[in-house]
Image (cartoon, rainbow, N blue to C red):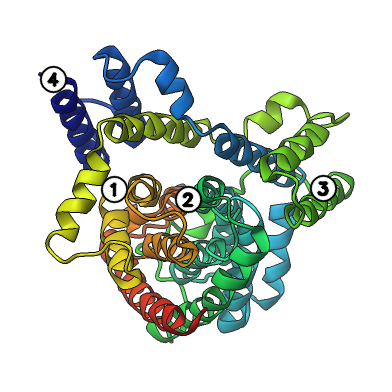
Amino acid sequence: MSHPETVAAIFALTYVGIALGGVPGLALDRTGIALLGAIAMVATGALNPEEAAKAIDAPTIILLYSLMVLSGQLRLSGFYTAAALKANRFIGKPASFLGAVMLIAAVLSALLANDIVCLALTPVICFSLLEADMNPVPFLLGLACASNIGSAATIIGNPQNMLIGQVAGLHFDGFLLWCGPPSVVCLGTAYLVILMLFKGKWKRKDGRDAAPAGQISKEEWPPYDRHQSVKGLVIACALLVMFFTPVPRELSAVIAAGVLLASRKIETRQILGMVDWHLITLFCALFIVVAGVSKYGMPRQAVSWLEGRGVDINAPYVLSLVTLVLSNILSNVPAVMLILKHINLAATKNLYVLALISTYAGNLLIVGSIANLITIEQAKSFGVRIGFREHARVGVPVTVLSMLIAFAWIAVAA
């Protein structure tokens, strides 16, 4: 085969594998499939090693890595656990407790990596609710939905937003002003949906919703260290201030990570253990796969084919629907990487639309976002089962309403 045919085959196989989530007979996940696709691009000569190395957007990877280090510091210092336990004062009032959990998750996810927020909060919420003989399901669904919605508000809230912001050179304040307001409305809407769907169902049903409380042992959560928590929060606040300046975000973030690594108490190995190397590998691999198809002009040909049939992917509502569908087939990070090669990067409004919709789409199905998967997998260790249908019962109305809110915002926002 010629290089264009080879590249098309590698790309198709990679993205089909990502959509399926694995390969029958092999213990490969989405990251492994993407990595094999990247290796194939180089091994077949479609890209040479230098082209593959240049394809990886170093500033995006550095920013993602650095924010994971910051989030890891706060997790190891017990800050996340302390924040979750603060909400326990409302546990006797389910509606108030749900609101507190969702607000904490949304705010933390807007400022830090939403995946780590779910990883840290899920065990504490599960244990507290089961101790109180409450049904954890609505609260965990609220946690996942709120972390996705909250992360949409800022350029550092999730990996796909970081990618969009870095590739297009978007400003932190402009992104926040455009994406923040609809995210606040969507958060309130998600809260009301869960409140309505689970009205009168806050109590636990033994043997169905979870293992009996006596069979559950408390996990070894990191003890709260006030000094280390304050240190992490001060650096996080300083970093946010730097994001409003002309200093490159990745430079500010990596300096902050360096300061945190120079610790007298928390070992380097512990902090780096909090970095999601799996996700970083996925990013690097997808950069290479997408570079392969871009080298041979395939994205441009696809856009031209659509335009010839009257479909303009740069039209905000068309872009929204394409993003929604692809995000739930491929997951939002691969979908965003693919779409960024097709749209006009000078159209700032569309970049905001891409960030919002790809993140809101994560609530539709379990596979739509890594935050969903983390929450559900963590809950299993407490005997709490959330199936595809139960998640969709909340995720579908939340996503549909979020899309309508986003459409209304697109119509009125400058």
Q: Are marks 4 and 2 in contact (CB under 8 Å)?
A: no
In the rendered structure, the answer to whether residue 342 lies left or right of residue 11 reads right
Q: Quadrant of residue 326?
A: bottom left
In the rendered structure, the answer to whether residue 383 lies left or right of residue 248 reads left
Q: Are marks 3 and 2 in contact (CB under 8 Å)?
A: no
Q: Secondary structure at mark 4?
A: loop
Q: Which mark is residue 330?
A: 1
- Marked residue nearer the N-terminal end (1 or 2): 2
Q: x and y percent of residue 45 in the render?
A: 27, 14
Q: Which mark is residue 235?
A: 3
Q: x and y percent of residue 307 in the render?
A: 19, 59
Q: Amino acid at mark 1?
A: Leu
Viewer-nearest of discs 3 and 4: 4
- Marked residue nearer the N-terminal end (4 or 2): 4
Q: Amino acid at mark 2?
A: Gln
Could you tell me which residue is drawn at 45 percent across and 30 percent down?
284
Viewer-nearest of discs 3 and 2: 2
Separation (CA) of disc 1 from disc 3: 35 Å
Badge 4 is on which residue? 2
Could you tell me which residue is drawn at 55 percent across and 49 percent down?
162
Badge 2 is on which residue? 160
Q: Secondary structure at mark 2?
A: helix
**Crowd tier of the residue under label 2, counting other residues whose Cα lies within 10 Å: few below 14, some 14–19, many 20 or above:** many
45 w.r.t. 99: above or below: above
Q: x and y percent of residue 112 in the render?
A: 64, 53
Separation (CA) of disc 4 from disc 2: 33 Å
In the rendered structure, the answer to whether residue 347 lies left or right of residue 366 reads right
In the rendered structure, the answer to whether residue 227 lies left or right of residue 310 reads right
Q: Amino acid at mark 4?
A: Ser
